[in-house]
């Protein structure tokens, strides 16, 4: 297995680009035993609603033969088993950027769950191969979609799309309506899900800071492309030799120091951040992003435009404002918005509450229709 290596500063940036804000850090051994629990300084500033206990259930399930972390915000853990009248009629489904560490999106999911008055579950899925289950963690096996075909490159761009489609088909009842939220490359996945699984009852898709075109031409893409597409091969072996034998206590300490320095939190184990296998898959997916996410899929956008909301940043080096201007020109009737608050691409760092409030506001009409229907 090819393994990438990132220098501490670059790795810190990778963590920073994917984590939430404020609160506590819980670092665990793969066995699930808590190694350390650190309270971070800005936890007191958290929104009062988020301070209330919001249940977040962690599970690992086999999806297309790959262990997949799913974090479920709300009391509903199995939508098939719940046959009560209170079973939710809608699911909010979050697809992360890259790295696809779902644990870093928990603050955003909690904030969004509170913003929709706790009426609907909010689930976050990890990308295939980006998170490994702790050794003593039970991995649930779901019955596969009988119509599903073997995914030959599940860790690649197309494979990650098929991975999400397979999960939705096997874990969400057909009558449950879906709101899909894609962040960064997750926006690309959200568009491709609409294209390749039109039978899924998706009523809205929110594409936040969407990297859906010309990734290698963006300011960050011009820097990342040589590292992700060529230089990563030279780093596989030293990365493996450095990280594989590294004791989990040392890895946990490094992660704790990085998160504490950035004043960030993670309620769940994030040891996969320093797992060579996971980092290899992060880099592999990134290389395909640079090479394959080139032309915007205007055909899919046109077909599903009434369902789509695009949200572009003004200080985003992954999708600069020119990309916003171009898509706005091509689809003047679309719901295509430009951030007025200087929110960063990695909004889950500092602005998850603002984004959750905005998404909930955009969803008001759709959610009221769901309530009326029930």
Image (cartoon, helix red, strand yellow):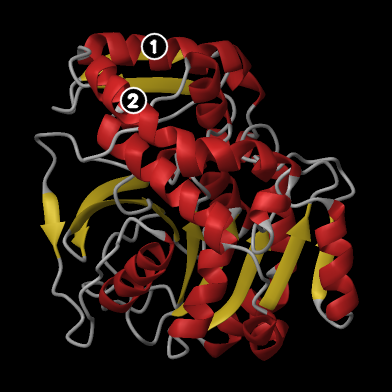
Residue 264 on image: x %, y %: 55, 23
Residue shown at the point (38%, 73%) measured from the top left:
86
Say whether residue 138 is left or right of residue 155: left
Is residue 230 placed above or below 369 in the rendered structure?
A: above
The picture quadrant where one finds residue 156 is: bottom left
**Which is more toward the observer, 81 or 217?**
217
Residue shown at the point (42%, 73%) measured from the top left:
88
Q: How far separated are the C-alphas under marks 2 and 1?
A: 9 Å
Q: Is residue 270 visible?
A: no
Say whether residue 238 is left or right of residue 341: left
Figure quadrant of the N terminus: top left
Residue 145 on image: x %, y %: 21, 81
Residue 16 on image: x %, y %: 57, 28
**SS for callout 1:** helix
Is residue 158 placed above or below 216 in the rendered structure?
A: below
CB within 8 Å, label 2 to label 1: yes
Is residue 155 placed above or below 229 in the rendered structure?
A: below
**Which is more toward the observer, 228 or 162?**
228
Q: What is the crowding at mark 2: few (fewer than 14 residues within 10 Å), some, or many (at least 20)?
A: many
Residue 94 on image: x %, y %: 50, 58
Residue shown at the point (30%, 20%) measured from the top left:
238
Q: What is the crowding at mark 1: few (fewer than 14 residues within 10 Å), some, or many (at least 20)?
A: some
**Which is more toward the observer, 188 or 134?**
188
**SS for callout 2:** helix
Q: Is residue 76 visible?
A: yes
Say which residue label 2 marks: 274
Which numbered disc, 2 or 1, marks the residue that appears first in the sequence? Answer: 1
Residue shown at the point (35%, 9%) measured from the top left:
253
Residue 254 circle label: 1
């Amino acid at each position: 297995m090819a393994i990438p290596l990132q220098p501490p500063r670059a790795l810190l940036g990778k963590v920073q680009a994917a984590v939430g804000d404020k609160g506590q850090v819980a670092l665990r051994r793969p066995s699930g035993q808590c190694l350390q629990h650190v309270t971070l300084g800005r936890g007191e500033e958290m929104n009062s609603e988020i301070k209330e206990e919001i249940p977040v259930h962690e599970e690992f399930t086999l999806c297309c033969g790959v262990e997949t972390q799913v974090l479920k915000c709300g009391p509903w853990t199995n939508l098939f088993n719940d046959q009560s009248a209170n079973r939710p009629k809608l699911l909010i489904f979050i697809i992360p950027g890259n790295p696809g560490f779902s644990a870093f999106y928990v603050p955003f999911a909690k904030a969004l769950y509170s913003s929709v008055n706790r009426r609907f579950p909010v689930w976050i899925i990890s990308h295939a191969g980006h998170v490994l289950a702790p050794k003593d963690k039970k991995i649930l096996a779901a019955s596969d979609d009988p119509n599903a075909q073997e995914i030959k490159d599940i860790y690649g761009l197309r494979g990650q799309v098929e991975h999400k489609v397979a999960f939705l088909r096997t874990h969400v009842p057909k009558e449950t309506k879906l709101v899909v939220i894609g962040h960064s490359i997750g926006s690309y996945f959200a568009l491709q899900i609409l294209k390749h699984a039109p039978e899924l009852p998706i009523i809205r898709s929110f594409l936040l800071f969407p990297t859906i075109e010309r990734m290698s031409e963006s300011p960050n893409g011009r820097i990342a492309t040589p590292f992700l597409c060529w230089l990563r091969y030279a780093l596989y072996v030293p990365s493996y030799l450095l990280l594989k034998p590294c004791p989990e206590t040392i890895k946990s300490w490094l992660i704790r120091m990085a998160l504490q320095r950035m004043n960030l939190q993670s309620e769940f184990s994030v040891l996969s951040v320093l797992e060579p296998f996971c980092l290899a898959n992060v880099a592999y997916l990134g290389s395909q992003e640079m090479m394959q996410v080139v032309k915007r899929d205007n055909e899919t956008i046109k077909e599903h435009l009434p369902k789509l909301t695009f949200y572009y940043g003004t200080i985003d080096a992954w999708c600069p404002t020119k990309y916003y201007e171009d898509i706005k020109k091509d689809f003047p009737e679309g719901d295509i918005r430009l951030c007025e608050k200087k929110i960063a691409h990695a909004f889950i760092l500092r602005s998850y509450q603002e984004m959750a409030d905005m998404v909930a506001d955009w969803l008001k009409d759709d959610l009221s229709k769901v309530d009326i229907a029930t």
